[in-house]
Amino acid sequence: MDQFIDVLDEKTLASYPQQPHGGKLVNRVLAGNELDEARNRAKQLPIIMVDLEAVITLEMIATGVLSPNEGFMDEEDYKSVLTKGRLKNGVVWPVPLSFAPTGDRNQQVIKTLSVGDEVALADETREPVAILKLNDIFHYDREFRATHLFGTNDRNHPGVDSIYRRMGDTALAGPIQLLRRVHWGPFEDIRMEPKETWKLFYTEKKFKSVGGFITGANPLHRGHEYIHRNALEELDGLFVQPLVEMAKREYTRHEFRMLSYRSVLDTYYPKERTILAPLRVTYIFAGPREAVLHALIMKNYGCTHALIGRDHAGIGDYYEKYASHTIFDEFRPEELGIDIRLFHEVFYCTRCSTQATGHTCPHDEQYRINISGTGIRELLRYGVLPPKEIVRPESARIAMQGVQPKGFDENNMAISPVGKTINSIFPYYLTRSRIGGPKRRKSLEVEELTIEDLETVITDARDNADKIYKDIFEEYSYVSDTLRSAQPDWVASTRESIHRQQEMVVEYLEEKVNKALDKASDEFMYQDKSEAERELEVARKIFDDIPSPLRQEDLQYRVWNPLPYKRYRGSDED
């Protein structure tokens, strides 16, 4: 009997609309007698201590999240992935799975190991998590990995920095056996493994298509919603996976991010078609390559479609704006095996009164509120809820609790300069006094913006973001409604008052022109006839410019149907 229980039998799997990457859903989780025997064996093996990131990776491999990989890559696979984005057998794989332990004690153990040996991998409890069967031991070149994976050796790049902090000089490769899963804390009850999602999607819910969406360090915003709703118009299901655990400290803490998602999904999404589950994964910070990895992870969870936003797994300015889109041009659709759906940058257009992209909205940035995940996070850090047009309050309220550090220092500054935060979400503010408003005589500089500017722009957005289109609609409805009882009577009354007032002005000036002298006796005290006539001309033009009051009797001319309604209803009566 196989020591691993089959996750899905071949016949069942073949009936599903998706297949795991590489054709087999890997399962390296020991069970039953084999597990008992392996645990006893592990006590006799040399031990290498591993950190939390390694533990997470071990569990991902063992449960099939990273299929077809069954362990850490040997040198040939490792270099092939870095240089070609593929395993040595040609299967697409963008990011190497490597294991190069650090620490003096670990180094001493490594020196005693040979190909063919087994070694126990233990976490901070010193209890074995997995057994690694060595099929290769090779020199680990950190610079080679950084250059090929990230395109840079800059230690300011978080992925590069992680390599130099976490990786040693010798890599150990081979298949693993998982001895125990690590408890996921508050996520334990809602965690899902691939073996569960495949059955949920295709056996229980009978879906024919599922869109996967992996999201990182920021709370759910309405750019995410735009992508989700577009997908749900076409696909049977939506599988949302916020990344949890391995986030930088200044990000929104993962417990709060997860709850922000749950709050919005519970209220605004179709419950039977939307599944939420945490994805416990190590942050690789690999930009476009990580976007490909996430697509393959979605595939291994059973998704038929991968929903990829503009800045998926982006890292600052290290990559082109749409690098996470163009990288998919390097692979044929059939070798990826999952339908990639790419979405452009989403913003809220106050003129369109909806979320939009540059492909769907013709208006320029004077009407836009940008949906920047980083900017939203920094607004929360400054202690203010972002405009409802870009983040729902159900999401922002919870996420704000999880942003640390919170507030700003003695110079009114947080981690990101306030000017940078303002510019990322409210690009119009530098050149216009308010959203959709007039241009400033002199543009503002990002570096000059202060916390007072943040207060001003937030207030402006709250007051006017939904007012622009509302005002436009009110103007259209006033001149269009023939059912005048749908319009407030005070508007017509006010316009009638203005008309009467201006009529009086015109009447007075007409009389003034009639009495005016051709030549004034004192040009500083009196007007001559020509100046009075110009004054009257302006008054008459103002009268013409006053919007007309509209009442029911004024609009009878618009009713032009020649027959009574009973004739239209098919009656032959006269």
Image: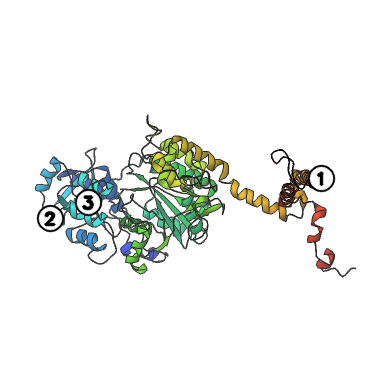
What secondary structure is marked by label 2?
Answer: loop
**Residue that badge 3 annotates:** 153
**Sequence order check: which comes first, mark 3 or mark 2?**
2
The three-letter code of the residue at mark 1 reads Lys
Is the image coloured rainbow, by chain, by secondary structure, or in one colour?
A: rainbow
Crowding near pointer 1: few (<14 within 10 Å), some, many (20+)?
A: few
Crowding near pointer 2: few (<14 within 10 Å), some, many (20+)?
A: few
User: Given this view, does label 1 or label 3 mark the residue nearer the observer?
Assistant: 1
User: Given this view, does label 3 or label 2 mark the residue nearer the observer?
Assistant: 3
Residue shown at 63% from the left, 48% from the top = 471
The three-letter code of the residue at mark 2 reads Val
| Mark pair 2, 1: CA separation | 115 Å
| Mark pair 3, 2: CA separation | 31 Å
Would residue 365 be seen by someone viewing this image from the given angle?
A: yes
Q: Position of residue 367 (x, y in %)?
A: 53, 51
**Sequence order check: which comes first, mark 1 or mark 3?**
3
| Mark pair 1, 3: CA separation | 88 Å
Question: Looking at the rendering, in which quadrant would you find the C terminus?
Answer: bottom right
